[in-house]
Image (cartoon, rainbow, N blue to C red):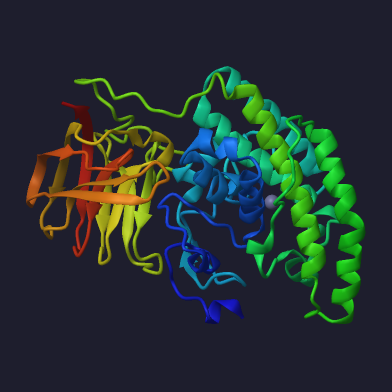
Amino acid sequence: MLHRIYKPGRYLCAWADKYGIEGEGFAPLSMPGHHFITKAALEAVPEMRAWLGPEAELLTWTYCGFPDMNWHAYGHYQAACEHHPEVRYPDTRREWEIPRYCDYNDLTKSGEWFGHTYPDAALAAGKHYRRVCAAGRQRRSRDAVRLLGAMLHYLEDCGAPPHAIGLGGPLHLPAENIRTPERITIAGYRPRPIFDPAEATKRVYDFAVPRAHCIVRRLEKDPAADVLDLQLECANACAEVAADALAAFHRQFASSLRFRSRPARRGVELLYNGNFMQPDDEAYCPAGWVMKWWDRKDRNVVLERRNNGQTCFVMAENVVAPVACMLTWTRALRVHPGEVYAFSAKLAADDVSDKCGLYAEMYDGATCKVGEWHVAAPASTRWRQVAGRITVPERAALMRVGVAAQDTAGPVRFTSLSLMRQ
Ligand SMILES: [Zn+2]
């Protein structure tokens, strides 16, 4: 059982620690295939990497996993499985607003669901490529790259051996899991800047089917058989068509899309739903915000949005390790070093530790943390204003603000968050 050897690391999936990746917004899947295929594809299109800048890292470690992180299990306590012990999943689905990018909400069942095997995955790749191009034409550069990630996922699924032949059961995992994903490479491949999703998905599917049958024959004889050679051939075939897609996207949009960010306007409210009135698809979380639990094995901690009929607030109770309610990544502020922001909220709590109050994290463009900011709030049975000034540190390009608590029985209540550039 894998969960016996699981050690809590930075990410939900332990394999990621081995590769030294460190973005706070990275969300590695249970198996590394998609990420390393995307990485190999990007390496074959260096002009794409240069153009995207830090977004290339997010495309590799987060966006190409979107369709596999769209389950509403994210943010909730889950029983042990073959990948994890009993643990609360980080709320990746909400923090990247994945239902919007996949056009499917797993909780409300709104939108359109696609399976991850051929031909369903091929239809999904086609639909998402049309959405990539639409976002590109509307100059929504970051949305276009996130949609491109979802598209790449479905494209890569078409050529994944167990997905190509719809192999379920106990052989799915050994057929899929690539032991040495860092060996996926298409060095020397010259991408064609033409991409037709129907043709590309069919090509990798046709390539994978005979190899998948061969993998099954080997695994049926011996479940521990070495199938790496065939897995790598299929993964490399996927990386080639993924590189074509990247080259085509670059050719079509390099002259019109930009990834620089303009400074925020001064003196205007920058937060959406700072009074937490609007619930997300589950009432415990305010729309545009996401909960973060530092100890995802703690079952007793409470962190949720409440509505008492007069006020909507976020409440923290039974808190030991830190918890926070923060802006989603898609709403993170694009900031520049030296800028000053005024941040405030209201807090009510009979008793608080000095670690309860306003909180902010700053990151570089690829979501690696470069700074933290905190202002403690005094205890007060009535709603009381807490305020502070944030000066954006060197290297910061992104900032997420929120409220945090630690080491308090609580309850601690927060509402009326406001952020303005000075
Ligand atoms: Zn998938």
**318 in relation to 262, above or below:** below
> Looking at the picture, how far across and down is residue 53, in whole percent?
47, 38
Left or right relative to 320: residue 284: right
> Looking at the picture, how far across and down is residue 209, in whole percent?
89, 55
> Looking at the picture, how far across and down is residue 193, in whole percent?
73, 31
Left or right relative to 68: residue 4: left
Count all numbered tags in the image, as a single digit: 0
Residue 104 visible? The answer is: no
Q: Quadrant of the C terminus?
A: top left
Left or right relative to 157: residue 27: left
At 23% across and 50% down in the image, what residue appears?
372
Q: Nearer the viewer, residue 161 or 116?
A: 161
At 29% across and 43% down in the image, what residue appears?
395
> Looking at the picture, how far across and down is residue 120, in whole percent?
80, 42
Residue 168 visible? The answer is: yes
**253 in relation to 381, above or below:** above
Q: Quadrant of the N terminus?
A: bottom right
